[in-house]
């Protein structure tokens, strides 16, 4: 199957869906479809685990934010941030992941934590509730 | 300890670091520091697990991209995307995570997958290597 075959069969190749209907026409394609289905199940399992971890992470950072606010600690801690950047870089390399993706993950969770605490502050929590890096 | 105490001690409160030096001055603060240290260890463990999962996810999507390219399948699959959005939304709710964060996670991994495959295509892999949603 080439791109032009896909074009002619489906009209718009961008909307191609990997399913049993495609596999029927070609045994070789059926093998690929089965393998993709298997990989997608693994991807879904990974995503489920990742969402569970993110849920736990935000629970933990919320507690850190609360504790910092109660004790009057500053929200940001750049020494902690440097530690996290270097540690995640090292872990990513060991895991066979591009360290840039690990840094994007860190920025994603930190940015969300910042936004959440900014909303708490806007609602009257005061700037000390702004736990930036946890 | 109040914000102004922190100001006078550190000059710039934004660079406050949670460490043993602060705990020495105040037993109550020592309790908070110990608890934050404990929570940070959990956050670091969560991040380590998340990086390992991301490493596995990108390995799996790279395989899906390769299989699609070999079989001539289209890179995008919007039926698959809809399924993932709804599934992650449901999992996030069950885990006690804001579904918006789950959607941001999905966008983060999908965007990165897109970028990676765009680079493969630019290097001569052809547009069929562009596995968008895996």
Image (cartoon, coloured by chain):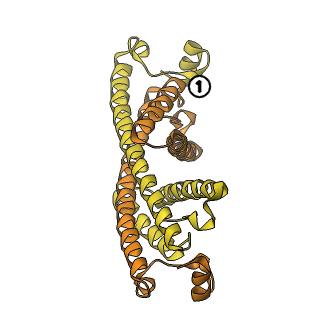
Chain colours: A yellow, B orange
Q: Is residue A58 above or below residue A24?
A: below
User: Could you say where residue B68 lies in the image, as x and y percent from the top left?
Assistant: 45, 30
Image coords of residue B29 (percent x, y): 43, 78
Residue B73 appears in the picture as rendered: no
- Name the residue beneath numbered marker 1: A14
Question: Which quadrant of the structure image shows residue A111?
Answer: bottom right
Q: Is residue B80 above or below residue B57?
A: above
> At which x and y percent is residue B51?
39, 55
Q: Residue at x 40, y 69 (%)?
A: B36
Residue under mark 1: which chain is it in?
A: A
CA neighbours of label 1 inside 10 A, class few (<14), some (14 to 19), many (20+)? some
Picture quarter containing residue B15? bottom right
User: Looking at the image, which residue is at 50% across and 77% down?
Assistant: A79
Q: Total label count?
A: 1
Question: Of residues A119 and A22, which is closer to you in this image?
Answer: A119
Residue B32 visible:
yes
Find numbered disc 1 in the image and state the secondary structure of the residue it sits on. Answer: helix
């Amino acid at each position: 199957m080439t791109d032009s075959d896909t074009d002619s069969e489906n009209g718009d190749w961008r909307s191609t869906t990997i399913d049993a209907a495609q596999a029927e026409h070609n045994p070789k394609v059926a093998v690929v479809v089965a393998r993709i289905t298997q990989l997608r199940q693994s991807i879904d399992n990974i995503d489920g685990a990742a969402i569970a971890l993110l849920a736990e992470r935000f629970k933990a950072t919320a507690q850190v934010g609360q504790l910092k606010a109660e004790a009057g600690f500053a929200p940001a801690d750049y020494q902690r941030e440097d530690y996290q950047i270097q540690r995640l870089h090292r872990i990513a390399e060991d895991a066979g992941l591009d360290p840039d993706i690990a840094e994007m993950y860190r920025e994603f969770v930190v940015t969300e934590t910042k936004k959440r605490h900014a909303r708490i502050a806007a609602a009257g929590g005061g700037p000390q509730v702004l736990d930036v890096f946890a």
